[in-house]
Amino acid sequence: MARHRGAMVTSPSPLRLRLNGGALVANWKLLAGMGRGAACGAAVKADGYGLGAREVVARLAAAGCRDFFVASWAEARAIADLGVSISVLHGVRKEDMAGERPPNARPVLNSQTQIRLWLAGGNGAPCDAMVDTGMNRLGIALADVGSLGGLAIDTLMSHLACADEDVPLNARQRDAFAGLRGRTNARRMSLANSGGIGLGADYAFDLTRPGISIYGGRQRAEHEGIAQVVTPEAQIVQRRGVPAGEIVGYNASFTAPRDMEVAVLNLGYADGYLRCFSGKGIARVDGIALPVIGRVSMDLVAIDVDAMPGLGEGDWVSLDYALPDTSALSGLSQYELITGLGPRFDRVWE
């Protein structure tokens, strides 16, 4: 069905993401329950991990989520009118202090420079603060916690480096962070990301900040109940017969072992369906597996459709894309797989 945007009429894309809103909310509720009484927020940076931050926020806010985390002030402005509490993880720059800052968004201060900027221009407004407990990425040093004294801190945070693994660093970071309790005027403390929630209740503190697991990512055995949210679908551009011995696709990486039927999809690495799926990916129709053959190119993918004689141009197929399984297949992280799905996909919520 054509869509009307003012005077312009556009056709639906030949690519779409089927987005399961029920699974999204169920995943968040499962993670919230694992926090054993801690409040549960949601990371919606990178436009809701590529799914559309406004749609994600609206669904999670209706389910009871009150705290949302973005990377930049542009991302905060994009959802500010939804009226939720927003933390900007990258803090503030001089440019941000001079620009528009929504009243329901506050910076997560990460450095002495950011602290000075906020003290000089924040007019005493609430902020959050990040303390580095061993990741050596963002955050002020433990020894500099005293410099937070002049701030009105809502949430004191740190970030786990290896929460998806069982390593001693997890406990060291937890204990270092716990040692900060009472040393600032922070209203709350927050450490656990998706993986950290699975490490146990002593990592939850007052507020958890799940991200990838809300969207279907599973990092630990404790995430077994996390459900798939995203299913890519593509339309067939052309169906063709390929004689035995002929090649399919660039560099002749596939030779037909028999006379076979091939469908070419409106999909490629420009859309985030990357070359690592060449000869490995699976499309499906009615549960029937249709293997990807040949090399994935920029805008096109070929699949073996011998098993589906009635499938033709304009028909839709789904792509296997459960994040844990697809990560194992491709060698890519679950984060890369979901955030890399490109803008040519229509986002269709169910």
Image: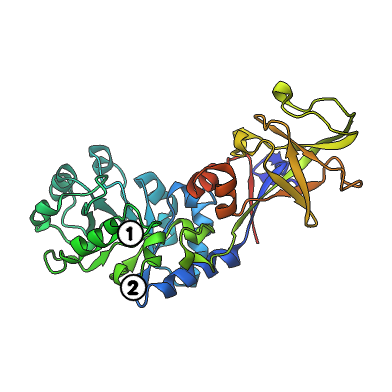
Lateral position of residue 284 relative to residue 159, left or right: right
Residue in view at x 13 percent, y 45 percent: 116
Secondary structure beneath disc 1?
A: loop
Q: Is residue 147 left or right of residue 91?
A: left
| Residue that appears at 73% across and 40% down | 292
Counting residues from the start of the chain, the first of labels 1 and 2 encountered is 1
Q: Give the x, y percent position of residue 103.
A: 30, 57
Q: Closer to the camera, 109 or 143?
A: 143
Q: Position of residue 270 (x, y in %)?
A: 60, 33
In the picture, the disc for residue 201 is 2
Among all residues in the image, which is located at the extreme top? 251
Percent across and percent down for residue 234 are 72, 44
Labels 1 & 2 near each other (Cβ < 8 A): no
Residue type at numbered disc 2: Ala
Quadrant occupied by the C terminus? bottom right
Residue at 11%, 65% in the rendered image:
183
Marks 1 and 2, how far apart at CA: 29 Å
Residue beneath disc 1: 104
Q: Residues within 10 Å of mark 1 (few under 14, many from 20)?
A: some
Give the quadrant of residue 98.
top left
Q: Nearer the viewer, mark 1 or mark 2?
A: 2
Classify mark 2: helix, strand or loop: helix
Image coordinates for residue 264, horizontal then vertical, percent: 78, 35
- Horizontal side of residue 64 vs 343, given as left or right: left
User: Which of 127/198 is in front?
Assistant: 198
Numbered label tally = 2
Residue 345 is left or right of residue 129, and the answer is: right
Please state which amino acid type lies under the numbered disc 1: Asn
Callout 2 crowding tier (Cα within 10 Å): few <14, some 14–19, many ≥20: some
